[in-house]
Image (spheres, helix red, strand yellow):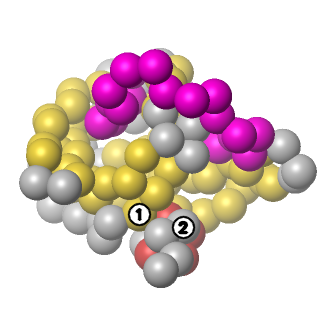
Amino acid sequence: MDLDPVSTNPDAYRVLFENARVRVLEYSDRPGHRTTPHEHPDSVMVTLSSFRRRLGTDGREVEVDIPGGVARWLSAQEHYGENIGETSTHTIFVELKDPAPQPTEEAVLGPS
């Protein structure tokens, strides 16, 4: 099953740049928008707006409230997301294509 966010949620994700080492995605949505499940490799997320979201996977959910203008690490993960705030979400993801090292602790859901 193809869980690439550009394929699963083309209304919200678009490719801005891609080469052999990275892919850069732009994500935008409006309050109430919910994505279908999709995967992200290890990435850096740069927020262009402040937003509040619910992220979920495998029966587990977390709510995140992130200010605009910050960069956060996003460990490889599969999730869905829902804009539960009152503002639109606008972010950039810089996805890494190099293989990740073996995790040493429980995977984190959402940005860290």
Q: Position of residue 55 (x, y in %)?
A: 23, 46
The residue tagged 1 is 38
Residue 100 position (above or below residue 13) = above
Tell me, yes or no, whether the highlighted magenta stretch contains residue 83: no
Q: Position of residue 25 (x, y in %)?
A: 62, 52
Q: Residue furthest bottom?
A: 1
Residue at horizontal 74%, vertical 45%? 97
Task: Give the prevailing secondary structure in the magenta stretch.
Answer: loop
Q: Give the numbered dot on residue 4.
A: 2
Q: Which residues are magenta?
A: 94-112
Residue 51 position (above or below residue 18) = above
* In the displayed structure image, the side of residue 42 where residue 20 appears, left or right: right
Q: Position of residue 20 (x, y in %)?
A: 88, 51
Residue 31 position (above or below residue 12) = above
Specify whether residue 102 is in view. Answer: yes
In the image, 32 versus 82, the foreground residue is 82
